[in-house]
Amino acid sequence: MPTDYKSVKKQFEKSMNEYDDNALVQNIVALKMICEVAQISINFENILELGSGTGLTTKKIAREFKFKNFFANDLVEKSKIYVQKYIPNANFLCGNALKIKPPKKMDLVISNAMFQWFDNLESAVGTIKKSMNKGAILAFSTFGVDNYKELRDITGLSLNYKTLGEIKNILEKLGFKILYGENFYEEMSFKSPLELLVHMKKTGVNSLSDEVWTFKKVKDFCDKFSKKYPKTILTYSPIIVVARKK
Ligand SMILES: C[S@@+](CC[C@H](N)C(=O)[O-])C[C@H]1O[C@@H](n2cnc3c(N)ncnc32)[C@H](O)[C@@H]1O
């Protein structure tokens, strides 16, 4: 099923107030990714951040990198307010990352925990590449095939996740040199399956499907989860890639 961006936007919009306190894994991933980029360079004339959300990654960009122009993008208009809290003169391009028209060519395009929503990674990266200068850096994080594996086991729902190897091949084919690639695991523990569902909602991720979670569906999910897993654990499987446009 193709990504329903209206639904993705709606879920993230709703979760924004609680996102930062709950997005613990996304925070670890952002820190690691920025650290990897900083080892290559901290100076970039033009930076574009895709899927800026509540500015969790923007804040770290503002702290670590030196730049002349900063552009942020998100489906959600309210993201601009969060971004400008950390970078007051940031330019905000609202809309689908693949449809925006940045006014300059970028030296760094960076995105945390957003590329997993692209239905066709090859075509998406091909589009993003057009807004990059030769030699520019593309740094992004997404999630691997084991992400939310407990949820997939119980509900059968999953995004079209790719392996690190598949992602590297796509980028190389598109004319990027891979500078860094990592797939790692983080587990989060909860007191109950219900608490796990609440956590997902607070990080904007009940948009894996359009399904309405009725009381009965929530109860069925919790019962099945408890039966299958003695402890309530949610596996995250983040992937970080840093590449240079040749
Ligand atoms: C998991 S949040 C990550 C937010 C932020 N990057 C962070 O590090 O916490 C994903 C964000 O990407 C945005 N998003 C998802 N698909 C998008 C697209 N195609 N274009 C622009 N923004 C998108 C969502 O609205 C949401 O704010």
Image: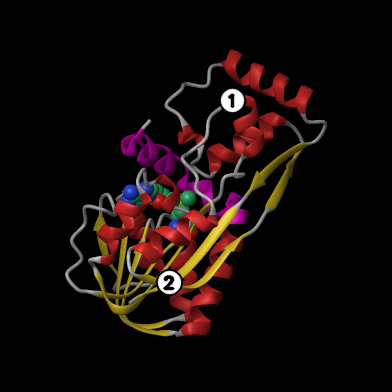
Quadrant where the N terminus lies? top left
Q: Position of residue 12 (x, y in %)?
A: 43, 43
Q: Quadrant of residue 119?
A: top left
| Dominant SS in magenta | helix
Q: Position of residue 194 (x, y in %)?
A: 67, 29
Confirm or deny contact between disc 1 and disc 2 (CB under 8 A).
no
Vertical side of 125 occupied by 144: above or below: above
Is 12 part of what is drawn in magenta? Answer: yes
Is 89 part of what is drawn in magenta? Answer: no
Q: Which mark is residue 243?
A: 2
Q: Say which label, 1 or 2, has the lower sequence index.
A: 1
Q: Is mark 2 within 8 Å of ligand 1?
A: no
Q: Which mark is residue 37?
A: none
Looking at the image, residue 206 sits to the left or right of residue 98; the answer is: right
Q: Residue at x 62, y 33 (%)?
A: 151
Applied colour scheme? secondary structure
Q: Label 1 sits on what residue type?
A: Thr
How crowded is the residue under tag 1: few (<14 C-alpha within 10 Å), some, or many (20+)?
few
Determine whether the residue tagged by mark 2 lies in a helix, strand or loop: strand
Mark 1 lies on residue: 155
Is residue 74 visible from the viewing direction of this image?
no
Vertical side of 25 occupied by 211: above or below: above
Query: Foreground: 241 or 60?
Result: 241
Start-end of magenta stretch: 2-26
Q: Label 2 sits on what residue type?
A: Ala
Q: CA distance from mark 1 to mark 2?
A: 35 Å
